[in-house]
Amino acid sequence: MSVVLVGISHHQAPVELRERAALDPERARELARRLAGERGEAVCLSTCNRTELYLAEDSPDEAERKAEAALLALEEELGPSLYRLRDEAAALHLFRVAAGLDSMVPGEGEILGQVRGAHHLGATGPILDRLFRDALHAGKKARTETAIGESPASVSSAAAALAEQVFGELGGRSVLVVGAGEAGELAIKSLAARGAVIAFVANRTPERAQELTRRYGGTPLSLDRVAGNLEHVDVVLSSTSSPDWMLSRAEVERTLHARRGRPLFLIDLAVPRDLDPAIHELDGCYLYDIDDLEAVVAETLAGRRREAERAESIVDAEAERFREWQASLDVVPAIASLRARAEEIRTAELDRAKLSGAERRAAESVTAAVLNKLLHLPTIRMKQAAAAADGVIYADAVRHLFGLEDER
Amino acid sequence: LAEFLFWPALLAYGEAAVAYFGEARQPGRAGWAATWGVRIGWLVQTALLGVQAARSDGFPWSTWGGSLNLFVWLVVGAYLIWGCRPRYRLLGLAVLPLAVVLFALARIGGGTGTEGQSHYSNLFLVLHVGLVLAAFAGFTLAAGLSALYLWQERRLKRHERSILRVRAPALAKLDDVAARTIAFALPALTFGIAVGIVRLEDRGGGYDALMAVTVLTWAVYAGYLALRHFAGWRGRRAAYLVLAGFALVVVVRLALPVTHFAA
């Protein structure tokens, strides 16, 4: 059986095409069932970056044709963007996908769950089940043995990660949000996802502040009450479109005594900036503006790319293991036939000997041991030959030498 | 046997110290090698102390070199409580090079052999030397945590780009753990000093410079805890105060013991 992959991804297809080929879970399940048919296997992997069909069939050409037709039925214009891979190349591709090495942001974590979901929804048999399980293993291994997925890849997650560098876990830390724009909301999500509590939301328009407090909790504030509430919070997140400082150094300095040494982390996502840069000079105050955050993200992305090189070698090794396993399947029927024939002869000869109960048991034990020892080396050698791509030749030779042709 | 155990322990600590520098440059395998270096070194040194205890007639660490040997074991043991956690590995940069130097000095001072004997009673030595050394080990660890705090704080203040690549423990955590370590170490020092004073009153004898500096050390750490509790001292100022206290610990450990042990 061969593995065939036909798909599109963000490398060749723009989002306008990808969105037309996207499959929701129900359609992915239904398409997998239809493509697998009676004897085949199929899995549909559909994410925002890719739609890929994996098939395992005896005829790779036929499988490829079916997969292409299925994708073109979703969107006719996909043709030039389609890629087609088989066996080792298809396996290596899936392993790289699972490890996040084929993603827009190297090492992004979401893809592993998407591969797992596709596996569950697929119509799998021995080949694709093994392929997807190995891919998930390779993806996890790449993430645990390298730092490819550790660092934040966006400004909002970098801001939350930097807050953790000051406070440790953010559970229970309170946040004052100044300005309720879109950029600010992404940062709120990142902070809240790490357990931070949104204590206050201050905004020029009270309606928008109330809308955010309904979603994330906290108390709406007017902008003139921001400085007065500084002593109650650990993090200040500002993203207004105001041309003036929302907080000056003097305003922050006045609260330091009441804070009793508790650090204050300030995130300024606004351009022009909302927070007086001189706040950063105060003891226990750490202010990061948009440029500082983008510089941190650039460094962490460079780090991810460096780690990606190490992850590639892990994925290569795992793909090689899958290739060896798949190749060994070529010789498994020949090995099984050889062992069955030997066992048949052994049993027939023991029956012919007409032995007593005790004699029979002794002879059973001795002949079984002889048989196992005799067949052990040929079995190992055939599996090794299969891994080195000579498996079919060896399997044919064994069938010919032992007269197993009829059992093919 | 003690000689046989000293070198592997020193080698393991040395390997860990070098590996921690590698970890600071590129986190990963070096940190793993460093952690195992510390673990193995500490286990071998434990065996060395066991051999010394079994072969000696009396408390074997009453000499300057011997007490240094025990001190290194306590410092590394205290470090192992946190140091095996990936975020705290960088603390090893402060602790392990110091441990290597002090362990080598302990050998030069004759503190790693089995021939040492003392004319003091075992109970007195266990209580006095043991408690004071345990306290000093705690202060050493707190100094390492404070040094790491200042380094991490400087990176945040300078907006260093690599701050999320080479990660250190959070500032608040470092500050808190240093304070807790001192809160455990200070009572030990208090009891250790009290045992020494009681014996001095009982048997007679004069006060020396070491005792004065030790009491001054106690005052600095007691002041640290008081300022933290009553005046909200945290962060950079508190870290500098811990390091000032540690400077006195270094003076007590290295400069003055010659006179104290001679007495």
Image (spheres, coloured by chain):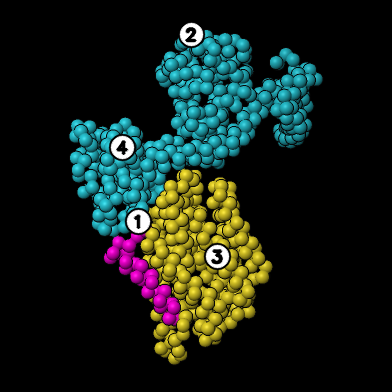
Chain colours: A cyan, B yellow
**Element at label 1:** loop
Q: Residue at x 65, y 65 (%)?
A: B7
Q: Residue at x 27, y 45 (%)?
A: A247
- First in sequence, mark 1 or 4: give its number: 4
> Circle 1 marks a residue in which chain?
A
What's under tag 4, amino acid-wise?
A: Ser
Q: Residue at x 58, y 82 (%)?
A: B117
What's under tag 2, amino acid-wise?
A: Glu
- First in sequence, mark 2 or 1: give its number: 2
Write the start and end of the magenta stretch as one range. B211-235
Disc 3 and disc 2: Cα gap in Å?
Answer: 70 Å
User: Against A35, is A348 above or below?
Assistant: below
Q: Quadrant of residue B173?
A: bottom left
Disc 4 and disc 3: Cα gap in Å?
Answer: 47 Å
Residue holding disc 3: B98
Q: Are marks 2 and 1 in contact (CB under 8 Å)?
A: no
Residue holding disc 4: A239
